[in-house]
């Protein structure tokens, strides 16, 4: 049984996105007084009491901020209405009924599903004054809330659950879907890629730069498995960000990288790798996320006679910190290789969850140390006593040493690269943390410093005995 869909609609600036954020309990949608901020359908699943519902935010009906996007924005609203099990029709109790409210009401009257008229920005006097006027829209008594102040939100959610059709009320137990963030500079083809995955015009894809503003979660299935593709706003140079709307879109893109399980980093085969691409690569490395580089619009590069081997070398030179990331070549416009990219993302996600037991890990650390020892600093040399994996996603290894200060940054990178290669994490970013540990228990007697080179690794305690 599918999750019931609750669609929020209304004219611009009645507080739909504020209500969306209040209902899900987080700031996911961009809130700004500028009309037309929301363009795509934003959706997220939300648990209220023992029920799971999907809440959908839509663009404002009646005002289009860019004439080139009018048809596509209206189409997204229509898709959201057609998929809805219940509609929240939002009006502004402080302004009263406007011609655009009447237009929305006319659009909704033919719908046979439950519709709740939500009077936002309500206080006792304003709602009482406007109540009779809102009755003229042809719906039940308006439900008073203040989305900004979170007044009445829980009661509204209770009302939503109560009004859902009986067949939609049972929760659906399903595993957590893998989250894949699509990131890249503007107009690289992220939205086209996601629409190809979803098999529908789920997000607006347009050559107008900056079309996508929010980070949009789009669920799709492949091989019986569920995924969430996160479409993000195209990133550009910070000094060129146009106002708060685009700035917050960029901030949400960075946040999407952090909350994703895997990142697909789209680069444009028809454009040179530039400063923005390198900045995105830095964000991915900082977040330490499994990542595949998706070279999109590859058909345009092939027309110029460029081959994959040559482009691999080009990326190694222009994005040197991303050499661990596998590369796949796609043309999202015609769906070429897009599902192979998802298969690759699944493989990376699985590898990033691998856990290495204590013995093999310490053997790998010992071999790496023997191949290359840290430089002597002020007559002292760094020693490694013991290593343990402390987490997955990303694989994180804690190395107990005599002093982290005796290991240069270059040695950190060396150890990361060695463990990546020796432990089967070739395409996965790792974290290696050095921590001071002056004493280590050997047997049941006194505590001693034990050099890893002299230790009997097979007798080391397992992780759960160590801490």
Image (tube, rainbow, N blue to C red):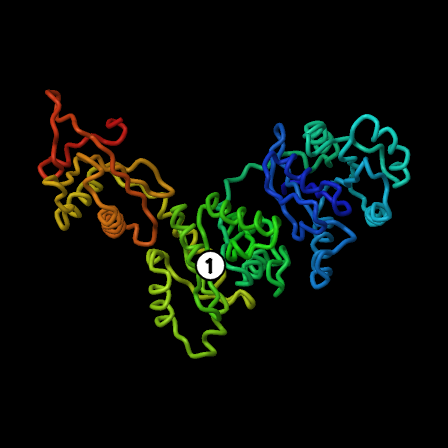
Residue 90 drawn at (x, y percent): 77, 40
Q: Which of the two residues, 390 or 207, is positioned nearer the viewer here?
A: 207
Whether 64 is drawn above or below 176: the answer is: below
Snapshot quadrant of residue 47: top right
Residue 20 drawn at (x, y percent): 66, 39
Q: Residue at x 35, y 72 (%)?
A: 310
Whether 152 is drawn above or below 212: the answer is: above
Work out which residue is located at the far top of the displayed protein and give it: 445
Q: Residue at x 43, y 65 (%)?
A: 273
Q: In which quadrant will I find the C terminus? A: top left
Snapshot quadrant of residue 134: top right
Whether 299 is drawn above or below 318: the answer is: below
Q: Could you classify mark 1 by the number of other residues whose Cα lies within 10 Å: few (under 14), some (14-19), or many (20 or more)? A: some
Residue 159 drawn at (x, y percent): 73, 30
Image side of residue 339 versus residue 326, left or right? right
Q: Residue at x 42, y 79 (%)?
A: 305
Q: Which of the two residues, 98 or 169, is positioned nearer the viewer here?
A: 98
Q: In which quadrant will I find the N terminus? A: top right
Image side of residue 246 versus residue 460, left or right? right
Q: Could you say whether the residue bearing mark 1 is in a helix, strand or loop? A: helix
Q: How many marks?
A: 1
Residue 93 drawn at (x, y percent): 81, 35
Which residue is tagged 1? Answer: 276
Q: Which of the two residues, 43 or 134, is positioned nearer the viewer here?
A: 134
């Amino acid at each position: 049984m599918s999750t019931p869909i609750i669609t929020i609609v209304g004219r611009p600036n009645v507080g739909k996105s504020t209500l969306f954020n209040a209902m899900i309990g987080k700031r996911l949608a961009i809130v700004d007084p500028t009309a037309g901020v929301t363009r795509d359908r934003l959706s997220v699943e939300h648990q209220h009491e023992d029920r799971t519902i999907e809440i959908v935010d839509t663009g404002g009906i009646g005002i289009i901020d860019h004439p080139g996007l009018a048809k596509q924005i209206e189409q997204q609203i229509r898709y959201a209405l057609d998929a809805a099990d219940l509609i929240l029709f939002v009006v502004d109790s402080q302004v009263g009924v406007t011609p655009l409210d009447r237009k929305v009401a006319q659009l909704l009257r033919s719908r046979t599903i439950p519709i709740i008229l939500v009077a936002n920005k309500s206080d006792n006097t304003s709602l009482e004054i406007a109540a009779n006027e809102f009755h003229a829209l042809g719906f039940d008594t308006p439900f008073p809330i203040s989305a900004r102040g979170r007044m009445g939100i829980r009661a509204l959610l209770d009302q939503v659950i109560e009004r859902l059709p009986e067949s939609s009320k049972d929760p659906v137990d399903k595993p957590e879907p893998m989250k894949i963030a699509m990131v890249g500079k503007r107009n690289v083809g992220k939205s086209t890629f996601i629409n190809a995955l979803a098999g529908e015009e789920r997000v607006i894809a347009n050559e107008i730069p900056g079309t996508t503003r929010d980070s949009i979660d789009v669920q799709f299935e492949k091989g019986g498995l569920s995924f969430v593709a996160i479409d993000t706003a195209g990133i550009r140079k910070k000094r060129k960000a146009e106002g708060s709307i685009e700035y917050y879109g960029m901030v949400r893109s960075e946040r999407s990288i952090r909350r994703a399980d895997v990142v697909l980093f789209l680069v444009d085969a028809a454009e040179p790798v530039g400063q923005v691409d390198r900045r995105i690569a830095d964000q991915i490395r900082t977040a330490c996320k499994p990542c595949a580089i998706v070279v999109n619009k590859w058909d345009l590069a092939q027309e110029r006679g460029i081959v994959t081997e040559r482009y691999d070398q080009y990326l190694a030179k222009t994005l040197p910190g991303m050499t661990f990331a596998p590369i796949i070549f796609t043309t999202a416009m015609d769906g070429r290789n897009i599902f192979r990219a998802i298969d690759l993302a699944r493989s990376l996600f699985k590898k990033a969850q691998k856990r290495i037991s204590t013995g093999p890990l310490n053997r790998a650390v010992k071999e790496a140390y023997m191949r290359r020892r840290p430089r002597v600093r002020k007559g002292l040399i760094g020693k490694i006593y013991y290593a343990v994996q402390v987490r997955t996603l990303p694989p994180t290894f804690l190395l107990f040493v005599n002093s982290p200060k005796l290991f240069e940054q270059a040695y950190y990178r060396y150890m990361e690269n060695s463990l990546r290669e020796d432990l089967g994490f070739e395409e996965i970013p790792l974290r290696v943390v050095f921590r001071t540990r002056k004493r280590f228990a050997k047997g049941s007697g006194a505590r001693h410093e034990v050099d890893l080179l002299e230790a009997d690794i097979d007798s080391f305690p397992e992780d759960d005995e160590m801490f």
